[in-house]
Image (cartoon, helix red, strand yellow):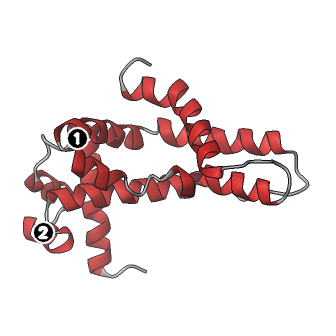
Amino acid sequence: MRTRSEQKHQDILDAAAAAFGEHGFGATSVDAIADRAGVSKRTIYSHFGGKDALFVAVASHAIARADAAVASPFEPGVPVRPQLEALLHRELVMLAHPDFAGLARALVAESFRAPELARAALQRADHGDSAVARWIREADAAGALDVPDVRIAASQLLALVKGAAFWPQILGAA
């Protein structure tokens, strides 16, 4: 069970994620987040220090939740293809979720306005440690795949998935 402080922290993260996803970083005020979370502005500053740090926390939290939703261990003895298809299907479902897509749009916009803030927010999105990379690493270790560089393989595979499905959605082309 969460403490009251932990619940407020989560409420702020949820409210900020929704606000940033709907309106972007620049058009979202700390006052609006506080109203949405049912807390005071001071509570937000107490938990996160400021809007930039809150944005980074929201992105990190979203990436961690997304990774957990996609993750599955490699299962030796089960054919590789259906496992990989299921893994990539979960990745696509997560990428298409309106909450994740909205936050991704905000991150893209911030990458032009404040690249250092976007970099900090995306620090957790390391393809070398993604659910896909962990699965590839496990499949390679089990001898089901022969992958010389897991980081590159995961990055290339995710680029294919995102190039076909994620980026067109984020940029409004699909």
Instruction: Give residue 110's mark.
Output: 1
Mark nearer the viewer, 2 or 1: 1
Q: Give the side of residue 41 with respect to residue 68, left or right.
A: left
At label 2, counting other C-alpha atoms closer than 10 Å, the crowd grade (few under 14, some 14-19, many 20 or more) is some
Residue 38 picture quarter: bottom left
At label 1, counting other C-alpha atoms closer than 10 Å, the crowd grade (few under 14, some 14-19, many 20 or more) is some
Q: Give the side of residue 109 with respect to residue 124, left or right.
A: left
Mark closer to the chain start, 2 or 1: 2
Residue 3 picture quarter: bottom left
Separation of residues labelled 2 and 1 (CA atoms): 21 Å
Q: Given the current orientation, which residue lies at the most extreme top position? A: 173
Amino acid type shown at disc 1 = Glu
Q: How many marks?
A: 2
What residue is shown at x 39% (from left), y 60% (from top)? 61
Residue 58 picture quarter: bottom left
Could one spot residue 14 in this view of the protein?
no
Q: Nearer the viewer, residue 168 or 127?
A: 127
Kindly check if marks 2 and 1 are in contact, taking CB atoms under 8 A apart as contact: no
Q: Nearer the viewer, residue 98 or 84?
A: 84
Amino acid type shown at disc 2 = Tyr
Q: Kindly identify which residue carries mark 2.
A: 45
